[in-house]
Image (cartoon, rainbow, N blue to C red):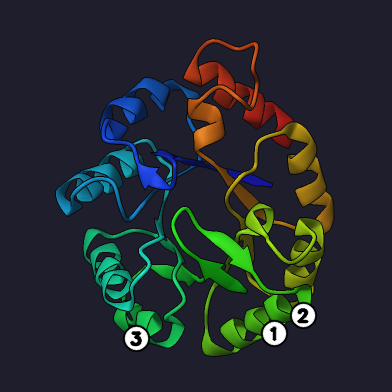
Amino acid sequence: MDFVFMLTRADQTVPDALEVLEEIRPLGLGHVGFKDVGVPPATLRALVTEIRATGAITYMEVVSTSRETALASAHIARDIGVERLLGGTQVVEILDILRGSATSYHPFPGKPVGHPTKLGGTAADVAADCARFAALGCAGVDLLAYRATEADPLDLVRAARAATPGYLLVAGSVTSAAQIRALAEAGADAFTIGSAAFDGSFSPFMGSLRSQLRAILDACR
């Protein structure tokens, strides 16, 4: 299962993301991402360049809450060359924006609300969305399983897996090795962690960010 390190805390990109990226470069992470909020577009562009220079796949997650800002973020993702765009709910419009680019799209199934984002909806709602997104041509989904307010997180993952032929990524509030194991057993392809690495809560006895990330990588094995 893939670990996507998000250069984010509290659902926004950290302002010193470029410095953090340089600090963690020796780890050779294969998947690194950021949110569409917290830093200006010029910094997002620089992050894509530097993440690619490490050999990692680039991710951007749309957490903007209005239609206009979400669509603007999709344009930015295409323009700066993000490889995998996560989140958002304006699926048809975002697919139109990304058409002809090398950016794949993985929207939110269910009923995401607010910022930091919570996830409403049942397992049946998530499965129906996943099937619809696949039919529209999405490359997978970005499931906020551990942000769920109406369903068991792992029920949502299993429902999404049954309905998703593409890449199933679980984002938000993954904070332990036990959760990572449970996600793998439920069929997830990837998960994201940002805040739990930055605040040291994933591995509380470790003192550095690099040590937190090593502990997360160990939990994937």
Q: Position of residue 144 (x, y in %)?
A: 61, 59
Please name which of the two marks, 1 or 3, marks the residue nearer to the observer.
Answer: 1
Q: Position of residue 67 (x, y in %)?
A: 33, 77
Q: Where is residue 158 in the image (x, y as percent from the top left)?
A: 81, 65
212 lies above or below 80: above
Q: What element carries label 2?
A: helix
3 lies above or below 162: above
Q: Do the residues labelled 2 and 1 touch (CB within 8 Å)?
A: yes
Disc 3 from disc 2: Cα separation? 27 Å
The residue under label 3 is: 96
Q: Who's the residue at 63% across and 51% down the image?
A: 190
Q: Who's the residue at 60% across and 82% down the image?
A: 134
Q: Foreground residue, 211 or 49? A: 211
Residue 68 vs residue 162: left or right?
left
Disc 2 from disc 1: Cα separation? 6 Å
The 10 Å Cα crowd at callout 2, few under 14, some 14 to 19, many 20 or more, is some
Pick whichever of labels 3 and 2 is earlier in the sequence: 3
Q: Is mark 3 on a helix, strand or loop?
A: helix
Q: What element carries label 1?
A: helix
Disc 1 from disc 3: Cα separation? 21 Å
- For badge 3, the amino acid type reads Asp
Residue 9 vs residue 157: left or right?
left
The residue under label 2 is: 124
The residue under label 1 is: 128
* Image quadrant in which you'd find residue 200: top right
